[in-house]
Amino acid sequence: MITIKRAEDRGYAHFGWLESRHVFSFGSYFDPNWMGISELRVANEDLLHPGASLDPSQHQDMEIISIIMDGKNLHTDSLGNRQLLKGRSLQLLSTGSGVEFTEQNASLENSLKMLQFWIVPQTTGNTPRYQSKNLRTPEGVQLLLSPDGRDESLQINQNIELYQFRLQHMICGMPESDNGFLYLQKGQLEVNGSLLDAGDSILFEKEPLISLRAITRAEGFYFKLP
């Protein structure tokens, strides 16, 4: 079974310095039909205005994935990390027993566009850990996160896999699982016969085959979930 959420149906919040769009219920946005899937709880697209920063926040027992799409993000946390990441980069903060952190737009001229995904970890109370990497941009499908850190992926404390896809007029399949989540960042994509536009998301539940066909150049992310 597949379920689609269109870009225009996402929750929206505007704080003057931050614009945020929510696939799942988050903050003041509540949709009882979209509370997450499997261990994925949050899927936000954030736009931080020049010089803006998220307020420092304390989290524990959550795997927080940030994908920097455009701009410059300065990450700081109570573990002593201070990392400047530019567009097309990935960071994973495993909050474990507790971490305070913030994200800041390091540019005073340009906006920062990032995606955030929150995953419930497989085990709790672990030692917090921060990881980051630049994203390569070849055509096709690349593994970004995995529980075993294979193929130069970042290692996450949950039985999930995160893939990046960049397709140009081609067809490919995605790994099957009990549950899945796909977010289309750019372009137009046909997924199991359904047409998606940029900003659209799709849930997979007990779907035996996941087939992608790029209508235009299509870029996005796919979670294989337990």
Image: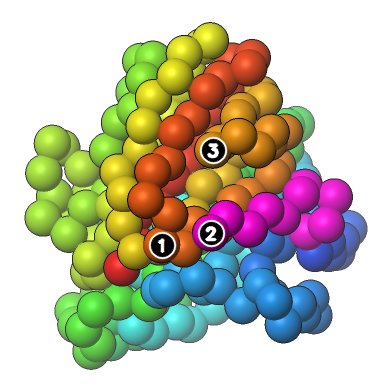
Residue 19 placement (x, y as % from top left): 80, 54
Q: CA distance from mark 3 to mark 2?
A: 10 Å
Q: In the rendered view of the protein, which quadrant contains the C terminus?
A: bottom left
- Residue at image location 42% in from the left, 73% down from the top: 38
From the image, tell me which residue sits under label 2.
1
How many C-alpha atoms fall within 10 Å of the one at disc 1: few (<14), some, or many (≥20)? few
The reply to whether callout 1 and callout 3 are in contact (CB within 8 Å) is no
Residue at position x 70%, y 42% from top? 199
**Label 1 element class:** loop
Range of magenta residues: 1-10
Residue 132 against residue 16 in the figure, above or below: above
For disc 2, the neighbor class at 10 Å (few under 14, some 14 to 19, many from 20) is few
Dot 3 alpha-carbon crowd within 10 angstroms: few under 14, some 14 to 19, many 20 or more: some
Label drawn at residue 206: 1
Q: Amino acid at mark 3?
A: Asn
Earlier sequence position, callout 1 versus callout 2: 2
**Residue 38 visible to an observer of this rendering:** yes
Please give the name of the residue rendered at 54% of the width and 38% of the height, measured from the top-left corner: 192
Against 137, is 28 above or below? below
Quadrant in the picture for residue 148: bottom left
Q: Is 68 in front, or is 72? A: 68
Relative placement, left or right, of 21 versus 176 is right
Q: Which residue is mark 3?
A: 192
Q: Which sits in the foreground, 68 or 76? A: 68
Q: Position of residue 151 (x, y in %)?
A: 13, 36
Q: Which kind of residue does numbered mark 2 sit on?
A: Met
**Residue at the top extreme?**
169
Sequence order check: which comes first, mark 3 or mark 2?
2
